[in-house]
């Protein structure tokens, strides 16, 4: 505790010492400010949300806090003591541990070994004391009320179990400041409930938790205070109870939450795509038409066949029967992705990191890979054309990057999504298929994606987009089709659509 003077009484008051503080952090890359005087303070026994758009500087701040980056100026203070973390191991030794969305679980070794990974293994002479190892690992899982089999290979665990093992590993290092980056991205609602129970238990133990999430409903359910960043600066810090979702959104993006969705007005009566009697593994007898200048939203519960429908249309999955007609031309049965792309149908997949981009490759190479004809002549690729194509994508989609040669894996999630979009838009498709186009993206970047979609359809492109979020489905679409158990359960115009009706279609009610 730190003593401070009260101006009214002249008496000393005790101010709690923060578990962790970042004071005036400045970080530049290639002369550009990524962080400009950022400050953050989290108390022991507090769950503190760190919010902001993709590119606001959250990831850079976390990397500085955990020793991965060194600040150009500013201080990191732990329990009142200024520290310099030369690397991640030094931060971990000081009790500061970060768990990222892509968990560092080793799938081919046991749960117990993963929990004590990086720690000194208990041994008898030159041999590992497996009994002592399992006892220490079990003690950490017991703190989390988890009964995960210690001998099971980590790769065989569910996503939430892998998250729990990662938390147990952090506790094994005596973590007192735990940073969680999008921990619920791969979890079901029930698994999220289990994780929240664990985090509340850690809060009771006095662990300070920094919680990074784009899901604001989680923040309001779980967190005590929040800090909002924008453009590399700290905008505000306040108790969660003293604000609202709309206020948080407007602070994050600098505009009203009601301005997220552009106006509709571009749909025509010109049929671009006709699907008749389409059948796949789950999709059953699906028929519909899509029009030029239209955003056709596809909704439904997980497993309803909505994503499979996009894969069938994109040629990524064979259909057993049915027909697909594009601009009056019937596509051959099972044409494959390449021929469908050439015909004018492009897919932006849900799993952008594994299916949409090569994260280790630079932006320009990623965009060029989907557009080899545009950047080559007589079998030779033109470096100039590759760079020019990438620069067009960077400018048109406002991708925040140091340049076209920056690796995609170094970009924020929203900017990675924009790279996938840039690659597909360079093909000038007649129909653009988008599977969960804003998943894992902050509200500001969502608004940019919605704007881009509207610009596309204004130019005559047809967009067919799957979303699991009903407000998004209504806001971005002109017309909505809801699927249930592989079939179309209902169709409505998006303007004035009723959430309750859409949800009833999701559960199979068609009357």
Image (cartoon, helix red, strand yellow):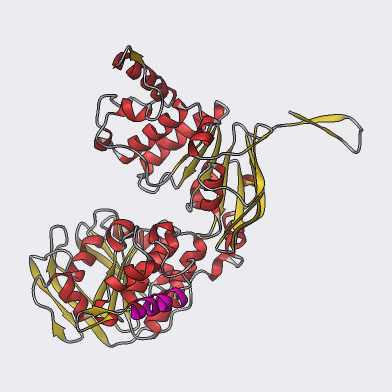
Q: How many marks?
A: 0
Q: Is residue 371 left or right of residue 116?
A: left
Q: Nearer the viewer, residue 419 or 160?
A: 419
Q: Is residue 25 left or right of residue 438?
A: right
Q: Is residue 496 left or right of residue 106?
A: right
Q: Nearer the viewer, residue 337 or 276?
A: 337
Q: Is residue 321 magenta?
A: no
Q: Is residue 167 above or below residue 151?
A: below
- x 39%, y 49%: residue: 185
- x 39%, y 25%: residue: 141
Q: Is residue 126 above or below residue 346?
A: above
**Residue 189 visible, this orientation:** yes
Examine the image and state in which quarter residue 314 appears: bottom left
Q: Nearer the viewer, residue 84 or 146?
A: 84
Boundaries of the magenta span: 384-395
Q: Is residue 165 above or below residue 488?
A: above
- Rendering coords of residue 98 (x, y %): 48, 40
- x 32%, y 41%: residue: 159
Q: Is residue 388 above or below residue 21?
A: below
Q: Is residue 390 magenta?
A: yes
Quadrant occupied by the C terminus: bottom left
- Seen as rendered, the residue at the extreme top is 124
**Residue 430 visible, this orientation:** no
Examine the image and state in which quarter residue 378 appears: bottom left
- Rendering coords of residue 82 (x, y %): 67, 36
């Amino acid at each position: 505790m730190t003593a401070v003077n009260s101006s009214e009484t002249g008496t000393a008051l005790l101010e709690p010492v923060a578990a962790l503080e970042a004071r005036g952090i400045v970080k530049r890359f290639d002369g550009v400010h990524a962080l400009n005087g950022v400050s953050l303070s989290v108390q022991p026994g507090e769950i503190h949300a760190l919010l902001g758009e993709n590119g606001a500087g959250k990831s850079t701040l976390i990397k500085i806090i955990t020793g991965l980056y060194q600040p150009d100026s500013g201080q990191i203070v732990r329990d009142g003591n200024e520290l310099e973390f030369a690397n991640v191991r030094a931060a971990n030794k000081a009790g500061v541990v970060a768990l990222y969305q892509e968990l560092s679980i080793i799938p081919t070794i046991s749960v117990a070994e993963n929990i004590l990974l990086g720690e000194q293994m208990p041994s008898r002479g030159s041999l590992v004391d497996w009994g002592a190892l399992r006892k220490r690992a079990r003690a950490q899982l017991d703190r989390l009320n988890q009964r995960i089999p210690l001998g099971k290979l980590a790769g065989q665990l569910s996503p939430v179990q892998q998250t729990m093992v990662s938390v147990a590993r952090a506790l094994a290092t005596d973590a007192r400041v735990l940073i969680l980056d999008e921990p619920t991205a791969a979890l079901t609602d029930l698994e999220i409930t289990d994780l929240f129970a664990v985090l509340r238990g850690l809060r009771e133990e006095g662990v300070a938790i920094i919680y990074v999430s784009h899901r604001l409903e989680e923040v309001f359910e779980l967190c005590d205070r929040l800090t909002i960043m924008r453009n590399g600066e700290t905008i505000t810090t306040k108790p969660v109870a003293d604000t609202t979702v709309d206020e948080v959104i407007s602070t994050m993006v600098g505009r009203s939450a009601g301005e997220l969705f552009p106006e509709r007005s571009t749909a025509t009566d010109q049929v671009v795509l006709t699907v008749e009697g389409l059948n796949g593994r789950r999709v059953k007898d699906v028929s519909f038409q899509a029009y030029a200048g239209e955003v056709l939203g596809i909704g439904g519960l997980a497993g309803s066949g909505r994503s499979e429908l996009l894969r069938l249309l994109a040629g990524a999955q064979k259909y057993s029967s049915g027909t697909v007609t594009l601009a009056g031309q019937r596509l051959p049965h099972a044409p494959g992705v390449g021929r469908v792309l050439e015909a004018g149908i492009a897919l932006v997949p849900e799993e952008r990191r594994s299916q949409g981009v090569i994260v280790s490759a630079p932006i320009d190479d990623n965009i060029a890979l989907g557009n080899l004809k545009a950047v080559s002549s007589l079998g030779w690729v033109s470096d100039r054309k590759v760079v020019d194509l990438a620069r067009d994508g960077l400018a048109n989609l406002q991708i925040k990057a140091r340049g076209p040669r920056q690796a995609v894996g170094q970009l924020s999630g929203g900017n990675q999504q924009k790279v996938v979009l840039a690659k597909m838009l360079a093909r000038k498709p007649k129909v653009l298929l988008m599977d969960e186009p804003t998943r894992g993206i902050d509200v500001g970047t969502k608004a940019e994606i919605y704007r881009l979609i509207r610009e596309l359809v204004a130019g005559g492109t047809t967009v067919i987009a799957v979303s699991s979020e009903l407000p998004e489905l209504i806001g971005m679409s002109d017309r909505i089709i809801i699927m249930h158990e592989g079939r179309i359960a209902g169709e409505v115009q998006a303007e004035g659509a009723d959430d309750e009706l859409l949800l009833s279609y999701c559960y199979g009610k068609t009357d």
